[in-house]
Image (spheres, rainbow, N blue to C red):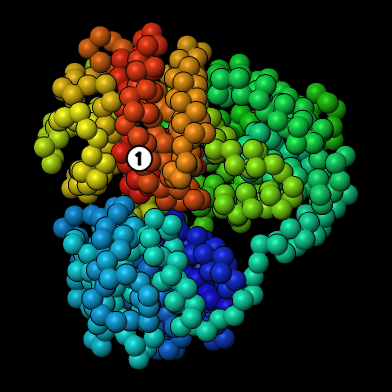
Amino acid sequence: MIAILDFGGQYAHLIATRFRSFGVFTQIYDSDISIDKLDSVKGIVLSGGPQSVFSDDSLKIDSKIFKMKIPTLAICFGHQITSHTLGGIVSKGVKGEYGPALLRVEKESLIFKDVSLESKVWMSHFDEVTKIPNNFEIIASTKDCQIAAMQNKDLNIYGIQFHPEVIHTKEGLKILSNFADICEVKNTWDLGSFIDKECLKIREKVKDKKVFLLVSGGVDSSVAFALLEKALGKERVFGVFMDTGLLRKDERKYVESSMKEAGFENLYTEICEDIFLKNLEKKFLPEEKRKIIGNTFLDVQKEIVKRLGLNPEDWLLGQGTIYPDTIESGATKNSHTIKTHHNRVPEIQKMIDEGKVIEPLVDLYKDEVREVGRKLGLSNKLVDRHPFPGPGLGVRILCSNENDLTIIEEGEVNNFKYQILPIKSVGVQGDQRTYKHPAVLYLNNDRLDWDKLDQSSVKIVNESDNVNRVVLSLSSKVLQKFKSKEKYIDKNRIKLLQEVDFIAQKILYDYELKALDVQKVWQFPVVLLPLVNEKNEECVVLRPIWSQEAMTAEFARLPQEILNQMSEKILEIDGIGEVFYDLTHKPPGTIEWE
Ligand code: XMP
């Protein structure tokens, strides 16, 4: 087995999944585990984390670990703490590196066996190792990080600043597989056995009770529904689909018919938009909105239990929670809260501690959930749906309590003019939550040069303290005068966003139906901003991304004609004056804006 020591990184669990995907059994431990427990492991991975080795309360590591000669792969913060503990120097970086960087392998190493001399890697750090410990050697660099990888062959230690576990590091899986070879671990895990093992666990946990499952019509809750039915039988799983009023246009009808088609009969719809809207009145802070939405789901659930005269003692609450929901909500010992997912509000956390919640997919990522869904016989149409978050349009309609804040700063990068907008969105940088301004870039001619736009976006964020996201204006080439506008969630804004979203999704759908051999968009949020142009018209953002499991993402590079079509059609809607296209990877942005 390979042991992963978790320093609170967003991707610690993802490292485990990657090893599992090529059949290596892994276990995650807190970073302060006693080293006797590591005696028999074949390899150790030190994860990233949100900390800095300089802070007084920084996590420490028992230096004896490094003397055990067990192969050790130290990633990001793990790389920094290894260097710091063994006598190297870690410094505050001159600037952060978030998202893509080009890695150059400089020395032969088992960890880079068959890895190209130059390849794209994904970074998320501010501090960096500036002097290696004695008896180490530098084995790879990037433009902004000279010690991107180091090794000590005698002690079997490999330190890397980038993240091999995220799918956007092009040869990351090869690097992890090389590490598994160095550890000489054999195949001990497969997803097929997951279903049988999980069914046993479900029966053990539920005993003679029943499950009240919150269903959204999306991938996770549908797969959870099918798995619970397999384990307990159809009559013991009661699915409830709540129409929160924050759904996409015509979503209720779609969910009802597609769930029926998939064979889920024990499903009940509750229309509860009024209570969601009432509870969100005048709210504008992202975390507050998220918690209100999560709590309202619970309130409605309790109300249904009461109305139907069910005895709460006979029921467990079922949820299709998957691993990113947990880690982003800050649920592991050293991790930060990036955003509180609707199924991880404190009241649910309390119910989990009391054993009142069942979540059969809680250790899986979206790509694994899809695989389980297919094995359970669900259709591709259902399993391959784009993810849609539980809080729905509630986190895509951004709100503000301030009027007339104007452009914060103007600048130029690679001949593109840009402005920093007077609103904010959530991001993830160096495993921490950020809440900063987006910048808007303007094209200087008619052609979209994706590489140049990508580099410009990365440069603005990496060099700025108050920007975590960059968008491109699809509607103007000259700088506009935007200002913030006091706006909250209300029926008019919901309807407006539903219309914009409907148009954008339809154009994407038609395009992908005909396009061959293109990388399909993984998720496509459309966002309404509390921002207006000089004519007092609203601004929307298109955010199509490419991803595999939502922990990292690249903004999608759609053909220019498709963007033009989307923008033209959306601008025909009364009241919409600007269409932006999100040019931000994750990190530094998150997929959703809040
Ligand atoms: P971010 O925005 O953090 O999102 O990059 C990662 C993935 O999680 C989805 N998401 C949620 N899903 N409840 C959910 O069921 C939530 O509260 C929630 N917040 C974000 C998001 O759509 C993306 O796929």
Inspect the image, locate mark 1, and give the three-letter code of the amino acid beneath it. Arg
Image quarter hosting the C terminus: top left
Whether residue 87 appears in this view of the structure is no
250 on left or right of 60: right
Residue 256 x, y percent position in the rendering: 71, 26
Image quarter hosting the N terminus: bottom right
Q: Is mark 1 within 8 Å of ligand 1?
A: no
144 on left or right of 51: left
Residue 261 found in image quarter = top right
Question: Residue at (49%, 64%) from the top-left corner?
Answer: 15
Residue 361 x, y percent position in the rendering: 65, 51
Q: Nearer the viewer, residue 523 or 311?
A: 523
Please name the residue that numbered disc 1 is placed on.
557
Element at label 1: loop
Question: Residue at (47%, 41%) from the top-left corner?
Answer: 516
Residue 165 found in image quarter = bottom left
Question: Residue at (77%, 47%) from the top-left corner?
Answer: 228
Q: Nearer the viewer, residue 560 or 64?
A: 560
Residue 290 x, y percent position in the rendering: 50, 34
Question: Residue at (37%, 22%) from the top-left corner?
Answer: 565
